[in-house]
Image (cartoon, helix red, strand yellow):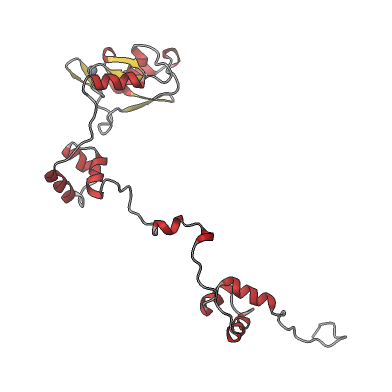
Amino acid sequence: MRRKPVIQAELPKSARAVFERKVVARARRDGDCVISELQPSRLRPEIYIGGLVLKAHCWAYAIYRGNIPAGMCVCHSCDVARCINPDHLWVGTQLENVRDMVRKGRRVKPQRLSPALTQEIRALAVSGTFSAIGRQYGVDPRTVAGVIRGPNARRPDTRGPRLERRVPAHLRKRPPATTITPDLADAVLQAKGRERACDAAKRLNVGVSTIYRIWAKASPAPERPTAPGMGGGL
Ligand SMILES: [Zn+2]
C-alpha cells in the first residue's frame, strides 16, 4: 500500500526516457503483455529513477496513464505481475485488488508439499540456499525454510531456556546466603588491597556484595606508624 500519491506531473523529468531505455527496451512481449525482465528474482521489480523508487508496473502506469492516488495500488487486468503494458493496468484500492484476485480465482493458497517432495527438499538442504532450492522446485523460499527447519522455526535458538528469561529478577530463586564463618571473614579480609573484590568472591565462593560488606566493616588498613615531628618524610 502506497501512502503518498504519485502525481504524473511531478515525476522526475527523465522518468519516461529512462524507463523506456532501462525497462521497456529490455522487456519481452508475451501475447499482449509486456514482461519486464529486470530483477528476475522479484515478482514485482522495483526501479529507481531520479530519486523515486516505484515498482516497474507503477512507473508504467504513472508515466503513460496518470496519477496514482494516495493509498491506491496499480493492479493488473492480465494478472501477470511482471507485465508493464499500461493498457493492462488499473488503479484500485487494496480491497478492490484482493476482491479482483478472489473473483478471478487467483488467490494464492498456501502451498502444501507432498511428503516425497518434502523429503527431497530436506535432502538438498545441506547443499543449497533456500532460494536456490525454491527456484528449482518452484516453491517459495520461505516454504523451503519451513520444510527444512520446521514450520515454526525462525532462526536457531541460541538463547537460554525461555522460562528463566521470563522470571523477573526479584522473583528468581537466589542461592542461599553464605554463612560467614570467622575463617571466611579472615580470608576475605586478607584479600583486601591484594585482590579485586570479584576475584576474591570467585575464589572464596561468596557474593561480591559479601566481600564489600566485610571490607567496609573492617577498619581501614593500618597505616605505617610515623613518628610525630618527622613530617612523614624519610
Ligand atoms: Zn499484461
Quadrant location of the N terminus in the rendered image: top left
Q: Which of 168 and 65 is in front in this view?
A: 168
Residue 4 percent location from the top left of the image:
45, 21
Residue at the image point whose x is 55% and y is 74% from the top: 177
Quadrant location of the C terminus in the rendered image: bottom right
The answer to which quarter of the image holds residue 89 is top left
Residue at the image point whose x is 69% and y is 79% from the top: 218
Is residue 103 something one can see in this rendering?
yes
Q: In which quarter of the image is ligand 1?
A: top left
Is residue 19 something one can see in this rendering?
no
The answer to which quarter of the image holds residue 52 is top left
**Farthest residue toward the right?**
229
Q: Which of 104 and 172 is in front in this view?
A: 172
Residue 72 percent location from the top left of the image:
38, 19
Please indicate whether residue 78 sits to the left or right of residue 5 in the image: left
Please indicate whether residue 195 sits to the left or right of residue 82 in the image: right
Residue at the image point whose x is 30% and y is 28% from the top: 45
State whether residue 115 is above or below residue 205. above
Q: Which of 130 and 20 is in front in this view?
A: 130
State whether residue 217 is above or below residue 74. below
